[in-house]
Amino acid sequence: MAIKRVMVIGAGQMGSGIAQVCARGGYDVVLNDVKQEFAEKGLASITKNIARSVDKGKMTEEEKEGVLSRLTLSTNLEDAKNVDIVIEAAVENMTIKKDIFSKLDSIAPEHTILATNTSSLPITEIAAVTKRPEKVIGMHFMNPVPVMKLVEIIRGLATADEVYQAVEDMSKSLSKVPVEVNDFPGFVSNRVLMPMINEAIYTLYEGVASKEAIDEVMKLGMNHPMGPLTLADFIGLDTCLYIMETLHEGFGDDKYRPCPLLRKYVKAGWLGKKTGRGFYEYS
Ligand code: CAA
């Protein structure tokens, strides 16, 4: 299964990062979003990132031009007709993902792999809306995509071995480290990470310590690069809440109940860095 042409759906933070590493890895990439301005914003962020790499001497001007020449923008899902793999990185909403996958299934050629970058939604359920569940797989990149080494590859119930292998090979060709996991709520990454973040929020909610103290304990005591509350702001508090709800519902276990303070912040529109305010304020 040779993968040469890639379509990335969603030009937000994750989608543009994925498009960047794929183009850097030598793949031809179509970056798709529902509006041209969203796709252009994604491309602007890629251009800024790789210009920084040139400034730091980590990439030549020629390599930069090569990366940009391999990227095209699209607002039409019909462009999936010409690709070997689609990596969907749209919003974390099952109804929207099912709609995208069912459309892609009717557009993309038979050999095309349909991957999703979902952070916690069941791959098997997404695959079930297609006639090719054996070619549907989770390809979960971490934020910031150009920096983080991990790709968590999630096998749905019906994912074929050769599809897994093709995605593993592709991840390695992007200089990432693939790790194989099975399809259960939150997979491994968010099943372990999110309850820790949620517990940090409970710790703040119960007045055990200030936000700065909680972050300092985890940074200096556990050697985490960011404290859990800073990390929650970085990921987005709406995403954190959504993942906790997926774990809570998926396992039916109250140990995953989202902290009321997290709900309150999301209701207030304090979603973290992207809105300028979460646990911290950002200018
Ligand atoms: N995009 C591209 N590159 C970035 C970047 C971004 N958003 N942010 C930082 N970088 C690059 C910098 O340019 C720098 O590159 P060089 O080494 O080439 O100079 C490098 O990363 C280090 O950056 P800084 O020196 O500015 O800052 P730092 O050392 O504090 O590192 C960090 C920043 C990599 C984000 C680090 O704080 C970190 O690892 N934080 C934790 C990130 C994490 O846990 N991510 C997972 C989130 S969970 C997730 O993604 C899954 C999910 O489903 C929710």
Image: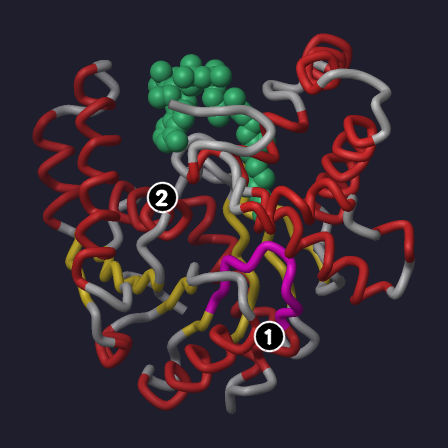
Residue 121 included in the magenta stretch of the image: yes
Q: Mark 2 or 1, which is nearer the eye?
A: 2
Q: Amino acid at mark 2?
A: Gly
Q: Amino acid at mark 1?
A: Ala
Image position of 242 (left or right of 244)? left
**How was the colour assigned to the protein in this rendering?**
secondary structure
Q: Position of residue 20 (x, y in %)?
A: 29, 44
State the residue in front, 57 or 232: 232
Q: Residue at x 38, y 76 (%)?
A: 112
Residue 206 vs 43, above or below: the answer is above
State the residue in front, 190 or 230: 230
What type of secondary structure mainly makes up the magenta span?
Answer: loop
Q: Residue at x 18, y 22 (%)?
A: 54
State the residue in front, 149 or 208: 208
Image position of 212 (left or right of 109)? right
Q: Residue furthest right?
A: 254
Give the secondary structure at mark 2. helix
> What residue does disc 1 label?
160
Highlighted magenta segment, given as a residue range: 115-123
Label 2 CB less than 8 angstroms from ligand 1: yes
